[in-house]
Image (spheres, helix red, strand yellow):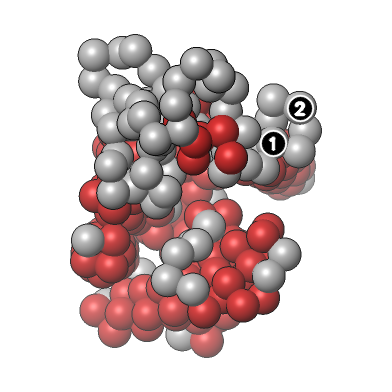
Amino acid sequence: PFGLMLVLALLGGYWQLRSELLRRGLGDDEDASAITFACGLIGILGGKIYYAILVGDWGAVFDRAGIVWYGCLIAGAAAFIITVHQRGLPLRPTLDAAAPALPLGYAIGRIGCLLVGDDYGVPSGVPWAMTFEQGLPPTTAGNLRDYFGVDVPASIPDSQLLAVHPTQIYMSLASFVIWGLARWLGRRADLRPGRLLLAVLAMMSVERFLVEFLRAKDDRFFGLFTVAQLLSVVIVLAVVTIFWRWRGASEAEAAA
């Protein structure tokens, strides 16, 4: 199921990118295909390498499990910039054309995580909490203690399945909303090139920062905070810095 949803995520990203390139008069089907292929291939490789670094085992690159979103984003961004340059497309407008494809692909991919029982949350009593008997790993009290360091009462036996936050659904729904907002913002005539991508990156980073508090994670190296949250903060700070630099440059040009 995850592999199927990964393919659908790439197809969805291709459709969204192609639609925006054509609407903006920037490129055609071949441009969208080349960008999607490069970003998909290099992005997945980057996600696997990031996972191997995180777990400290280079053999994990060849495991079926373990594709980290931020590794995909960093490697995919590099592949995107190189491919856009090779095809002679304007960088900032093409970045904006691709911006809505990010949350759309992410939302579809997270459905794959739900179907295989991966990336779930901590135990919860909310009505929509779910158990993952065949999860990666199953949501037993023992796994939540041993793999993720979750504080599960000692009175609960290791073999007991616990209902957890379906954080995959949270991430998917939030990303669909961001996708809708990105499509709406992308049609504003007063939005300067590059601003849409910055807005999407900021919204996705905030979403990831918040949902991490509910995730069952084994990488809380910063107290309550995970590595993904640290990267989310770095991206938001970078977005704010770039925005103000671009704004300052625009005001200087207007004054001249």
The amino acid sitting under disc 2 is Gly
Up-down: is 196 above or below 94? above
Residue that numbered label 1 is attached to: 220
- Helix, strand or loop at mark 1: loop
Image quarter where the C terminus lies is top right
Q: Position of residue 246 (x, y in %)?
A: 68, 45
Up-down: is 145 above or below 103? above
Q: Is residue 137 visible?
A: yes
Q: Compare residues 101 and 72 and report the one nearer the observer.
A: 72
Q: Residue at x 69, y 36 (%)?
A: 220
Q: Residue at x 61, y 77 (%)?
A: 59
Q: Compare residues 52 and 34 and report the one nearer the observer.
A: 52
Q: Compare residues 212 and 185 and report the one nearer the observer.
A: 212
Q: Residue at x 50, y 16 (%)?
A: 155
- The quadrant holding residue 178 is top left
Q: Residue at x 72, y 64 (%)?
A: 56
Q: Is residue 180 left or right of residue 137?
A: left
Q: Marks 1/2: CA distance?
A: 6 Å
Residue that numbered label 2 is attached to: 223
Q: Position of residue 89 (x, y in %)?
A: 47, 76
